[in-house]
Image: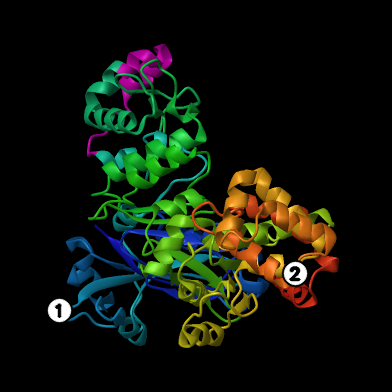
Amino acid sequence: MVRIRRIEICNFRSIRSLDWVPSAGVNCLIGPGDSGKSTILDAIDLCLGARRSAPFGDTDFFQLDVTRPIVISITLGSLPDTLKNLEIYGDFLRGFDASTKTFEDEPRASIETVLTLRLTVSSDLEPVWTLFSERATAAGLERGLAWKDRAALSPARIGSYANTNLSWTRGSVLNRLTEERANLGEELAKAAREARANFGTQAATQLGASLKVVTDTANGLGVHVGACAQALLDAHSISIGDGAIALHSEAGIPLRSLGTGSSRLLIAGLQRAAAEAATLALVDEVEYGLEPHRLIRLLHSLGAKDSTVPLQVFMTTHSPVAVRELTGNQVYVVRAGPKQHQVLEVGMADDVQSTLRADPEAFLAKSVVVCEGASEVGFARGLDQYWVGLKQQSFFALGGAFVDVGGSDPDRCYTRGAALLRLGYRVLVLVDADKEPKPETVAAFAAAGGEAITWRIGRALEDELFLSLDVGAIHSLLQRAVELVEEDLVNSHIQSQSDGKQNLDSVLGEGLTDGYSIPTRSLLGLASRKGKNSWFKSVTKFEGVAKDIVGPNLATADKDFVTLVERLYRWTHAA
């Protein structure tokens, strides 16, 4: 089962230089638009695809500079014996040390034997495919990969259009399921002239095993083809030849008429069924045309949950559903640098994996606000909505996302933020100041380029609001609390926190006559976040508080609190 061990790309489209050692299983590429994700898939397809030519133009060269050739090198491992034939390929066989992920120009014992195929395109726009090794180049030796071997290595491109893979065309997945082939001779021509159905009976005897695999795979994936798929003449074929035989349902409907999602799902399943013969699959925008439950089924079909990976898959996605379904060692962030692209493995560290599950949207963003809990998430989201009402651009529109680390441990914000910084994200930590994080944790985060906003010493978010907003805003907070959790609970929390010295009525009375004193404001901050029935502690509740109360009353709030909110505004709007 051939696997790609290394991908090297130079001067191809948006990529000036890239050198990546992918995993042997699922490689899901994420990153901002125009970061080069699809370009990587195209590079693999162009280098390994079974084609004698390919259309190239000046726009395929990095920054349109045709004086620097496009060079795409794919190093293949887990080679079959035919590709390790010393007489044919001996001068080009190389070595790969999996323990160090390093490559050597000559194979040796205890490391894997590999072969590098290189595609070069110069200013004449003519693609040239050759095998590469340093010693062969030094000796002036040139050789290409035999056509039969190239056809066997060609990856399956599971794209928007499935016609080629749902007919018995050259290179289609159907031709890789079994060795059987239909006879395109006189009988087929006669059947085409008389009726497509007549040929179906004859083809069924020749393609029975393939049709059974198709039927079983389709039924297993929930793609309806009837009790038995058929091989009938394609109604779109004008002449008898390659591709004239296509898959049809039991009712005779061409399976190329399936919806985009269904055809993708079926082809992925067939690709897995043919994994012994075709081990590489390319899927751009894996979520395209699929509902979430069918997207999950497609990922499973591609081997995302298998301990022994059946296929090596290269895919791109912008779907949080896809990201959530994968593990950290299957997800890679593509980063474009001024001189070199990087493909960074998200990894399996606890702080990353938990974010992958709880907030997969963060990995699809450019900027991330890591919040201590739901209160901070709701507060920041609510202020964002308030600013949008003032005709400012939304943080989400600027490519932002929020992460909720679940409260309790202030260090967790900084460690999770540091993990995201290592992957190239822009990160802000928004955290309470009622619990002290470890100084070394904060220092490591800051040293990595992270920024943090904390409330004033000893204060949680609720403390900051009740101590900073004016009398009218505090009255509005109390009214909102009564609406959200009922008057009796608000009153009970105030009484409990004050040891029975105050209640809701006395607090409201104080606000109407003398304004709220500092002790009363502090009391309300503590009472509002008391126990499991906190007044505002949820994303939705704090969104409303921030949008309807905090935002409109910032002009009369404590200036130090306003300074902190303005920092949040500047950071989110610099995304």
Magenta-highlighted residues: 178-200
- The amino acid beneath tag 1 is Ser
Q: Which mark is residue 110?
A: 1
Prevailing SS of the magenta stretch: helix
Residue designated by label 2: 517
Is residue 427 visible in this depiction of the protein? yes
Which residue is drawn at the image coordinates 41% and 38% (left, top)?
A: 265
- Which label lies toward us, 2 or 1? 2
Badges 2 and 1: C-beta atoms under 8 Å apart? no
**Way the structure is coloured:** rainbow
Furthest residue in direction front, as rendered:
501
Give above or below for 419 relative to 154.
below
Residue 388 lies, with reference to residue 210, above or below; the image says: below
Is residue 11 on the magenta stretch?
A: no
The crowding category of the residue bearing disc 1, from other C-alpha atoms within 10 Å (few below 14, some 14 to 19, many at least 20), is few
**Front residue of 541 and 235:** 541
Indicate left or right for 132 with 521 as reference.
left
Location of the N terminus by quadrant is: bottom left
Q: Position of residue 555 (x, y in %)?
A: 85, 67
Q: Position of residue 30 (x, y in %)?
A: 51, 61
The residue depicted at 49 percent of the width and 54 percent of the height is 532
Q: Is residue 196 part of the magenta span, yes or no?
A: yes
Residue 101, how many percent across, how many down?
30, 78
Determine whether, in the image, residue 423 is placed left or right of residue 58. left
Q: Secondary structure at mark 2?
A: loop
Quick check: 346 left or right of 88?
right
Which residue is located at x 65 percent, y 69 percent? 522
